[in-house]
Image (cartoon, rainbow, N blue to C red):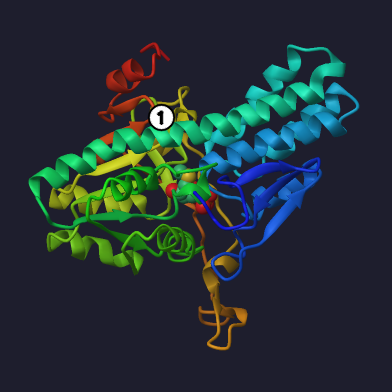
Amino acid sequence: MLVSGVPHRTIWLHEEAVRIIDQRRLPWTFELLDLRTVAEVAEAIRDMAVRGAGLIGATAGYGMWLAAREAQTQEELQSFAELLVATRPTAVNLSWAVKRQRAAIAKVGFEQRVETARQEAEAIADEDAAACAAIGRHGLKIIEEIAARKPGQVINILTHCNAGWLAFVDHGSATAPIYAAHAAGIPMHVWVDETRPRNQGARLTAWELAQQGVPHTVIADNTGGHLMQHGLVDLVLTGADRVTRSGDVANKIGTYLKALAAWDNGVPFYVALPSSTFDWTLRDGVSGIPIEQRGGEEVTEMEGMTTEGRVENLRIVAPGSEAANYAFDVTPARLITGLVTEQGTCAAEESAICQLHGQALSL
Ligand SMILES: CSC[C@H]1O[C@H](OP(=O)(O)O)[C@H](O)[C@@H]1O
């Protein structure tokens, strides 16, 4: 997506560094950050300067390029790989990108490792952007079918967290069909879950949609069920951080509750993801997907801008009270209407998923 002053990507090479948009500063300021070492990449992922499954995968891919440049031994390269994988456990794109880089580097001689890793990092990023563009094309058909049943009326879509172009290299996953429908002139409105505690919806999705001119309304996370009960949601569209071969979906905490409300009200619930988000080794996501737990301070404190334009962090929980901070939850496949990937759309069940993605049915 185009933002003044930067290429239409969230990550790119700049003078031997990896340049990113520092998402910790959005929407208050738009700041770029150059990462020059594996340690800086790991910290950027861990502290969510970059976040979102596709983007942390691409960032880890570039991190492995820096690792190939820094490491003097295979053991050192492996320790860098483990450092990157350990930064965030839930989004499988991260470990997928590191494994892909390790395999690419292993195929060439020591002298070619750096250039090979750079080319592979660029390929991972390019493929992520292309996959999200394809998700947009396939997801557009879902929105068009809903619009055909509501001729001339506004289509109301609810989304949770930020699975926008900020969470990928470009286009986003959940937002790609929204942007495609907007470009096609379909009248739309997006309910944007604020998405506590990091407020990716209120801060990032709202900023993105405003940049692209898509009508939207930010809502408290607890509002979606009420809206669905009153016929104000035509479609729920979210991203994913890890999807099992049977269609269980790990996504930002609160997604499961939205899926329950959608199920109870007969609202279509689609999950958009590039195929790099599948974990083909897992069937049961509820027991098998590692759920990241982050510091309680992300719940007890909230960042905002004062009326004088100062960005401040305030404690919003009673002094002395502790907070739990589960960053993801798992929505069982039975609550999901379908998955949208770069390969097309399919039911959230194993045979359909494996057939569309050319995977054998056996684990
Ligand atoms: C599908 S990528 C966007 C996805 O990632 C977010 O998590 P985080 O912001 O903590 O990286 C959230 O789960 C979004 O749905």
Residue drawn at (19%, 65%), measured in percent from left and top?
Answer: 226
Residue drawn at (82%, 18%), measured in percent from left and top?
Answer: 112
Residue drawn at (28%, 41%), measured in percent from left and top?
Answer: 270
- Compared to residue 352, the image places residue 214 above or below, namely below
Q: Quadrant of residue 311?
A: bottom right
- Say whether mark 1 is within 8 Å of ligand 1: no
Question: Where does residue 171 sit, x and y in percent of width and height?
Answer: 45, 44
Residue drawn at (69%, 18%), measured in percent from left and top?
Answer: 104
Q: Quadrant of residue 69?
A: top right
Can see residue 325? yes
* Quarter placement of the C terminus: top left
Can see residue 90? no
Question: Total number of numbered labels?
Answer: 1
Question: Where does residue 242 sit, x and y in percent of width and height?
Answer: 46, 36
Residue topped by disc 1: 244
Using the image as rendered, state which of residue 62 and residue 133 is in the foreground. 133
| Amino acid type, mark 1 | Thr
Question: Where does residue 350 sit, x and y in percent of width and height?
Answer: 31, 22
On the rendered structure, is 72 left or right of 297? right
Question: Where does residue 202 sit, x and y in percent of width and height?
Answer: 43, 66
Q: Residue furthest bottom?
A: 308
Q: Secondary structure at mark 1?
A: strand
Label 1, residues with CA under 10 Å away: few <14, some 14-19, many ≥20: many
Using the image as rendered, state which of residue 121 and residue 278 is in the foreground. 121
On the rendered structure, is 106 left or right of 218? right
Q: Quadrant of residue 11?
A: top right
